[in-house]
Image: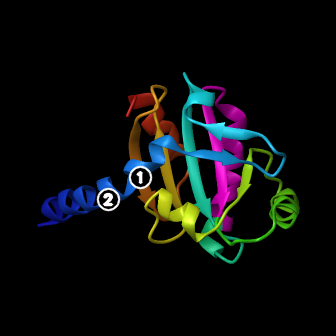
Amino acid sequence: MMKRFAITMAFLCLPALAGASGFSLTDTKGQTHSLASHAGQWVLVNLWATWCPPCLSELPELEALSKSRPDLVVLGLAVDGQPARRVAQFAEKLGVTYPVIAGDAAMAQQFGAKGFPTSVLFNASGQQVWVKEGPVTRQEIEGLLSRGK
């Protein structure tokens, strides 16, 4: 029964996430990020909100991951609808140094997010290979990268 549920959930998520492969996001420093701009690298897009305790708890894990893996780009997409300056200040207080994008609900829909946090992983060829709703850990992502997921 659980396997059937997982297959059904994966099937339901695929159409909603199809648009994510063509994303173009501008971070709070004005730099544009897309899969094409990070060709040859893994890209992890983490959708989070400033009001979301599980989101905030995973930020240190993602920060450590971004610093330890030159083959991975971590992009934090804050979906609160807050101004870029406020999101940048919030992330800075938390010690986040990877690129942070000030987004909104429409941007979250582009990635098929139904809740937060949601993480979407793209391989070095730009193909979406993994999605998780709920907090992620550094070890979890490193495991996916080492398996070439």
Does the magenta segment cover residue 32? no
Residue 6: horizontal and vertical position, in percent? 22, 60
In-image side of 85 versus 66 (left or right): right
The residue shown at (60%, 26%) is 71
Secondary element under disc 1, as helix, strand or loop, is strand
Magenta span: 56-78
Q: Residue at x 62, y 66 (%)?
A: 55
Q: How is the image coloured?
A: rainbow
**Residue matched to label 2:** 13
Q: How many numbered discs?
A: 2
Q: Which residue is more in the foreground, 12 or 117?
A: 12
Q: Position of residue 31 (x, y in %)?
A: 77, 40
Mark 1 and mark 2: Cα distance apart in space: 9 Å
- Is there any visible trace of residue 117 in the rendered image? no
Q: Residues within 10 Å of mark 2 (few under 14, many from 20)?
A: some
Q: Is residue 20 visible to the viewer in this orientation of the structure? A: yes
Q: Which mark is residue 104?
A: none
Residue type at mark 2: give it: Cys
Amino acid found under the numbered disc labelled 1 = Val
Task: Give x and y (percent) for residue 141.
Answer: 50, 43
Label 1 vs 2, first from the N-terminus: 2
Q: Is residue 57 magenta?
A: yes
Q: Quadrant of the C terminus?
A: top left
Circle 1 is placed at which residue position?
Answer: 131
Give left or right: position of 9 versus 52. Answer: left
Frontmost of labels 1 and 2 is: 2
Quadrant of the snapshot with the N terminus: bottom left
Looking at the image, do the residues carrying marks 1 and 2 touch, with CB atoms under 8 Å apart?
A: yes
Report crowding for label 1: few under 14, some 14 to 19, many 20 or more residues within 10 A (C-alpha): many
Seen at 66% across and 26% down, the residue is: 70
